[in-house]
């Protein structure tokens, strides 16, 4: 089944509200939204993810900090920003994560930019990269071989979130500033597969 067929079957479904606690104007989406303001919203303050994983962005056109949105309710910004080192009280764009496949995910981390130096291949979640043997707090480049991952700045899935997908950039993140439009550091200390 291809992605278009999955979209037509409702594989991806998200409902957004303009106010916290599922109040105010609402709209349901099965496809990406580059700018919620073009739909007459000022902002998104609460979300329900019915199907599929999504990524929300603080600015239009998929810019700014990224926040993973997996199946469930997000009544206010604390629910999606969680233990993030960066909090934004609203989102302005979002899209489905189409390459997520929890049972078939593989990523390779490199100690230098451009896939150079020591490397480590993973296919499981790691709440602490240092505890599993990675000798640095930094990951200068990453290659997503399959699936989709969320990398976090700090151990325990905390800090800035970077959504890394096989079907974006051919899964190649040669430099940390390719992790996100707002990636300020190559510090990555925990990583997990995105649930689908």
Image (cartoon, helix red, strand yellow):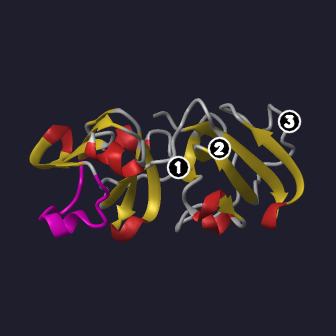
Alpha carbon separation for disc pair 2 and 1: 9 Å
Rendering coords of residue 101 (x, y %): 54, 37
Q: Which residue is mark 3?
A: 133
Discs 2, 3 touching: Cβ within 8 Å = no
Q: Give the class, few, some or many, for how many residues have Cα within 10 Å of label 2's Cα (few <14, many ≥20).
A: many
Alpha carbon separation for disc pair 1 and 3: 24 Å
Mark nearer the viewer, 1 or 3: 3
Discs 2, 1 touching: Cβ within 8 Å = yes
Q: Which residue is mark 2?
A: 154
- Residue 166's place in the image compared with 69, above or below, is below
Mark nearer the viewer, 2 or 3: 3
Task: Tell whether 48 sits left or right of 41.
Answer: right
Q: Which residue is mark 1?
A: 85
The furthest residue to the right: 117
Residues shaded magenta: 31-45
- Look at the image and tell me in which quarter the N terminus lies: top left
Rendering coords of residue 86 (x, y %): 48, 53
The furthest residue to the left: 24
Q: Residue at x 31, y 47 (%)?
A: 7
């Amino acid at each position: 089944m291809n992605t278009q067929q999955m979209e037509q079957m409702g594989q991806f479904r998200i409902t957004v509200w303009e106010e916290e606690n599922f109040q105010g104007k609402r709209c349901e989406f099965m496809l990406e939204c580059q700018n919620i303001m073009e739909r007459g919203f000022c902002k998104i303050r609460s979300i329900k993810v019915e199907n599929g994983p999504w990524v929300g962005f603080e600015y239009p056109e998929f810019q700014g900090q990224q926040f993973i949105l997996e199946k469930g309710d997000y009544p206010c910004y604390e629910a999606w920003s969680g233990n993030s080192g960066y909090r934004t009280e609203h989102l302005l764009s979002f899209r489905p994560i189409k390459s997520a496949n929890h049972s078939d995910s593989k990523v390779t981390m490199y100690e230098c930019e451009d896939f150079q130096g020591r490397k480590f291949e993973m296919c499981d979640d790691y709440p602490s990269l240092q505890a599993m043997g990675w000798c640095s707090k930094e990951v200068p480049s990453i290659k997503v071989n399959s699936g989709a991952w969320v990398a976090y700045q700090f151990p325990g899935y905390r800090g800035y979130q970077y959504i890394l997908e096989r079907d974006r950039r051919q899964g190649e993140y040669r430099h940390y500033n390719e992790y996100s439009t707002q990636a300020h550091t190559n510090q990555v200390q925990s990583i997990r597969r995105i649930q689908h």
